[in-house]
Image: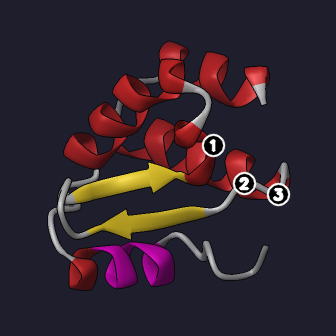
Amino acid sequence: MKECIEHFENERNEEGAAEALRCFKEYGEDIYFDDEEKRLVLAREVWDKEITNIMKEISEILNVRTREDFIKLKEKYNLTMY
């Protein structure tokens, strides 16, 4: 999990953000869209608040503001295969 964050911190762009999401999925993390927050959320944010700012930044970089944006993102970066 730490390597996912490190990868994103070294490459803060669209590809780096997508790679971090793929990495999170490989570690079995649940990623979902939160309608109230209007962003991507990792389920672990319930107990691990350190990841919240990273997920906010990833959501901004990938321009995910709606559930439809999230669905398109999953298809574009093949996030459904994990």
* Residue type, mark 1 in image: Arg
Q: Residue at x 23, y 85 (%)?
A: 68
Whether pointer 3 and pointer 2 mark residues with C-beta atoms closer than 8 Å, the reply is yes
In this view of the protein, which residue sits in the foreground, 73 or 68? Answer: 68
Q: Is residue 23 visible?
A: yes
C-alpha span from label 3 to label 1: 11 Å
**Residue on which the image places disc 1:** 44
Picture layout, residue 4 above or below residue 76: above
Picture layout, residue 71 above or below residue 38: below
**Residue on which the image places disc 3:** 28
Q: Position of residue 57 (x, y in %)?
A: 29, 32
The numbered disc on residue 82 is none
Q: In terms of image quadrants, where is residue 56? A: top left
The numbered disc on residue 29 is 2
Q: Is residue 3 left or right of residue 36?
A: right
* Magenta residues, start to end: 70-76
Whether pointer 2 and pointer 1 mark residues with C-beta atoms closer than 8 Å, the reply is yes
Of labels 3 and 1, earlier in sequence is: 3
Q: Determine if the magenta segment contains residue 24.
A: no
Q: Residue at x 50, y 15 (%)?
A: 9
Looking at the rendering, in which quadrant would you find the N terminus?
top right
Q: Residue at x 49, y 24 (%)?
A: 49
Q: In terms of image quadrants, where is residue 73? A: bottom left
Q: Is residue 8 visible?
A: no
Q: Position of residue 34 (x, y in %)?
A: 31, 64
Specify the principal SS of the magenta part.
helix
Q: Position of residue 20 (x, y in %)?
A: 59, 41
Q: Which residue is the extreme one toward the front?
A: 47
Q: Which type of secondary structure does the marked residue at label 1 adopt?
A: helix
Looking at the rendering, in which quadrant would you find the C terminus?
bottom right
C-alpha span from label 3 to label 2: 4 Å
